[in-house]
Amino acid sequence: MRPLSKVWLALSLLIVTPLAGAEDFGVANWGQSAMAVRDLEQRPNLTPLTERDYLIYEASLPGISRTRLVYQFEDGRLETGRFIFNVSPGSPTNVWLAQFESVRALITQQYGEPAHQQVLQPAGSSNNPPDNWSDALERDAVILKTQWRTDQTLITQQLAWNGSRPHHQIIYLPVNGADVSDLGTSPF
């Protein structure tokens, strides 16, 4: 194996491992309590002291400036998980696009080909792929969305414009036999 291939393989394993495992999300299974998740989680806890509806942990992924792992609870039970990604401050939009593609490739290695890949555009737009993806994102004219589905979890990766900068996240939702085809739909 070539040295560069070995480095890429090592980086891929480092990145994919934190994104998924035997658990439904992070170190937890759907329905667990916040106390149970807190007892299992080993990453630095960033959760405000009085918060009861979510837990925030610092995750470290190579090539990504900052990653937050968020466990969200409803009625005291884990119902949603998120990875929220950032790039270095001041990075151009094309860096966000490259990060989105890298994360999508890593998740595809873990779960196989996505069930859905979409470029969401406002109603009435031409629905043609833009000539310049960075420009389209900055104009809030596209949302990039990719979904995977496992037996237990719907995984949705999104890149959209939020206020004055891109927002890149992965949302994990329990399937529990429910029809989740409309979850994570476009705001357009």
Image: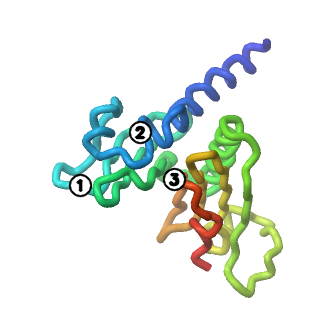
In the rendered structure, the answer to whether residue 139 lies left or right of residue 48 reads right
Q: Secondary structure at mark 1?
A: loop
Instruction: Give how far apart the Cα atoms at labels 1 and 2 are.
Output: 16 Å
Look at label 3 and name its amino acid: Pro
Report the residue marked by disc 3.
Answer: 174
Residue under the image location 75 percent in, 83 percent down: 125
Residue 28: assigned label: 2
Taking depth in this image into account, of 97 and 171 the one nearest to the observer is: 171
- The location of residue 11, given as percent across then percent down, is 61, 26
- The location of residue 28, given as percent across then percent down, is 41, 39
Closer to the N terminus: mark 1 or mark 2?
A: 2
Taking depth in this image into account, of 78 and 10 the one nearest to the observer is: 78
Q: Nearer the viewer, mark 1 or mark 2?
A: 2
Residue 60: assigned label: none
Instruction: Give how far apart the Cα atoms at labels 2 and 3 are.
Output: 12 Å
In the rendered structure, the answer to whether residue 72 lies left or right of residue 139 reads left
Residue under the image location 49 percent in, 46 percent down: 88
Residue 94 higher or lower than 106, as above or below: below
Q: Nearer the viewer, mark 3 or mark 1?
A: 3
How packed mark 1 is, by other alpha carbons closer than 10 Å (few <14, some 14-19, many 20 or more), is some
Residue at far bottom of view:
124
Look at label 1 and name its amino acid: Arg
Residue 20, quarter of the rendered image: top right
Q: Secondary structure at mark 3?
A: strand
How packed mark 2 is, by other alpha carbons closer than 10 Å (few <14, some 14-19, many 20 or more), is many
Number of residue marks: 3
Report the residue marked by disc 1.
Answer: 52
Look at label 2 and name its amino acid: Ala
Residue 180, quarter of the rendered image: bottom right
- The location of residue 162, given as percent across then percent down, is 50, 68
- The location of residue 81, given as percent across then percent down, is 45, 50
Closer to the N terminus: mark 2 or mark 3?
A: 2
